[in-house]
Image (cartoon, rainbow, N blue to C red):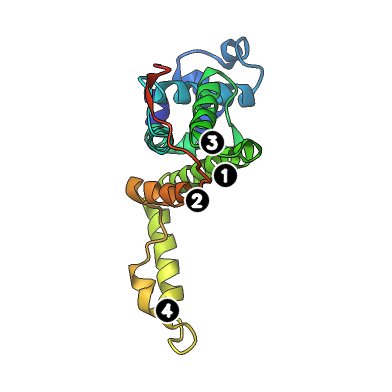
Amino acid sequence: MELLSSSEGDELFSMRKLAAELGTDSSSLYRHFRNRTELMLAIVDHVLVQAMHGYRRQGTWRARLVDLTLRAWDAYAALPQLAKDASHYPGSGPGSQLVIEETLQALIDAGVPEELIPEWYHRLVTLSVSLISAHAASQSSGLTEQKRRLQTFRVITLGADPADFPALVHYGRRIEPVGFTRESFLATVELVLDAVPARQERTCAGEGIV
């Protein structure tokens, strides 16, 4: 993971580049992974395994879902080059299975109607992965690119006619279209959790220790 977190650019995740960084050749990697996709799936799942270390199924369903989403955010925050492509590599090992299981268990304990659980699982995961990927793409683009995007946005807002776009002119200077914080990510997740059709408040006491 140290190798991944210190990297710059998608090229790291080519078989050739990764093998060179590890001091070997790409043929050795191909003995374990048939292609780049298999390699990325393994990396993503390893990140999820590490993120779930020490997780306990305890507290309310909502507290557990918050815990799960923040674990994912924190894990990928250190790996922006990987996180921005996470939606393409959902994982297929024990880490992915554990995250899916605990998300579904939390929705069950919330009393979400049986027929709605798959739909709400999909909503929560899609939201989390999309926000994490978008934030990572912004952070991994480099300071120069971030400044360029902000400058372009400022030109658009400052050039707006207040007669036609009064809200844009009023708030434009305070909008930062270059990513967001852990706190704003959590606030967005909380908005979705407010809408979960929970019918009960079952609390778990330390079940499923990982």
Earlier residue among tags 2 and 1: 1
Give yes or no for contact between labels 3 and 1 (Cβ–Cβ under 8 Å): no
Task: Give SS at disc 4.
Answer: helix
Badge 2, how many Cα within 10 Å: few under 14, some, many 20+? Answer: few
Question: Which numbered disc, 4 or 3, marks the residue closer to the eye?
Answer: 4
Question: Which numbered disc, 2 or 3, marks the residue closer to the eye?
Answer: 2
| Residue 209: % across, % down | 39, 16
Which residue type does callout 3 highlight?
Answer: Ala
Q: CA distance from mark 4 to mark 3?
A: 35 Å
| Residue 139: % across, % down | 40, 46
Q: Which residue is mark 2?
A: 195
Q: Which residue is mark 1?
A: 123
Q: CA distance from mark 3 to mark 1?
A: 16 Å
Number of callouts: 4
Q: CA distance from mark 2 to mark 1?
A: 11 Å
Task: Give SS at disc 1.
Answer: helix
- Quadrant where the C terminus lies? top left
Which residue type does callout 4 highlight?
Answer: Ala
Between residue 182 and residue 140, name the one nearer to us.
182
| Residue 117: % across, % down | 60, 37
Between residue 57 and residue 115, name the one nearer to us.
115
Q: Which residue is mark 4?
A: 167
> Which image quadrant for residue 3?
top left
Give yes or no for contact between labels 4 and 3 (Cβ–Cβ under 8 Å): no
Q: CA distance from mark 1 to mark 4?
A: 30 Å
Furthest-bottom residue in this view: 163
Question: Which numbered disc, 1 or 4, marks the residue closer to the eye?
Answer: 1
Q: Which residue is mark 3?
A: 86
